[in-house]
Image (cartoon, rainbow, N blue to C red):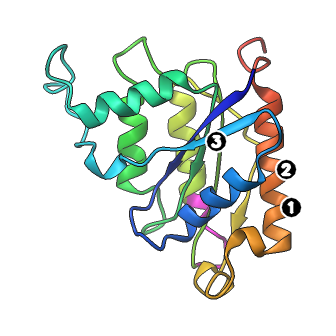
Amino acid sequence: MSVRILALVGSLRAGSHNRQLAEAAIKLAPEGAEIELFEGLAEVPFYNEDLDVEGKVPAAATALREAAGRADAFLLFSPEYNGTITAVLKNAIDWLSRPYGASAFTGKPAAVVGTAFGQFGGVWAQDEARKALGIAGAAVLEDLKLSVPGSVTRFAETHPVDDAEVAAQLTEVVARLHSQVGTASAS
């Protein structure tokens, strides 16, 4: 049986380096791991309890929840906007943490990685994403980190999958996340 990992990318830009990291993760996934890159975050409206009522939940939010329901683990790719998590990624976490008591994250392993232009590679945003995931019930792998600085120059002409250092680190992240499925809720 394959382990299903849902990838959520916190940037909507077509040429996003974080999207490229997610694409690299898909290519580098170990045997037995299947990474699904969720494509509909731009269509998910801002979380609003008035919309989160049976029969009113927007189709895009339902699709996100269904994808999360099929997932055994989560891998978030977080850029850093103004020193924190992007609205699109926080919104996805908000939708998946509801309804109260039925979070799609509960007991499932989750990791946060990313790249940003700054010298620290988006660590503040990634820390905020880990915090939100933990509050939402995920079994956050706090020590599983990958923050790639200088994305604009580092990936100007090289896709992350072709950067040997990044590819090796990303391979390790995915392999460790994969190995945590089935052990996260038991710990």
Who's the residue at 57% across and 79% down the image? 117
Assess whether mark 2 and mark 1 are in contact (beta carbons under 8 angstroms): yes
Please give left or right for residue 147 compared with residue 136 in the image: right
Residue flagged by tag 2: what amino acid is it? Glu
Residue of label 3? 35
Mark linked to residue 172: 2
Q: Nearer the viewer, mark 2 or mark 3?
A: 3
The quadrant the N terminus occupies is top right
Label 3 secondary element: strand
Please tell me whether residue 123 belongs to the stretch shown in magenta: yes
Residue 92 sits above or below residue 118 on the image: above
Q: Residues within 10 Å of mark 3 (few under 14, many from 20)?
A: many
Please give left or right for residue 64 compared with residue 8 in the image: left
Q: In this view of the protein, which residue sits in the foreground, 184 or 125? A: 184
The image quarter in which residue 120 lies: bottom right
Residue flagged by tag 1: what amino acid is it? Ala
- What segment is highlighted magenta in the picture? 118-124
Who's the residue at 79% across and 32% down the image? 32
The image quarter in which residue 27 lies: bottom right
Please tell me whether residue 91 belongs to the stretch shown in magenta: no
For marks 1 and 3, give the CA distance.
Answer: 17 Å
Q: In this view of the protein, which residue sits in the foreground, 186 or 38? A: 38
For marks 1 and 2, give the CA distance.
Answer: 6 Å
Mark linked to residue 32: none
Residue 105 sits above or below residue 174 on the image: above
The quadrant the C terminus occupies is top right
Mark 1 or mark 3: whose residue is earlier in sequence = 3
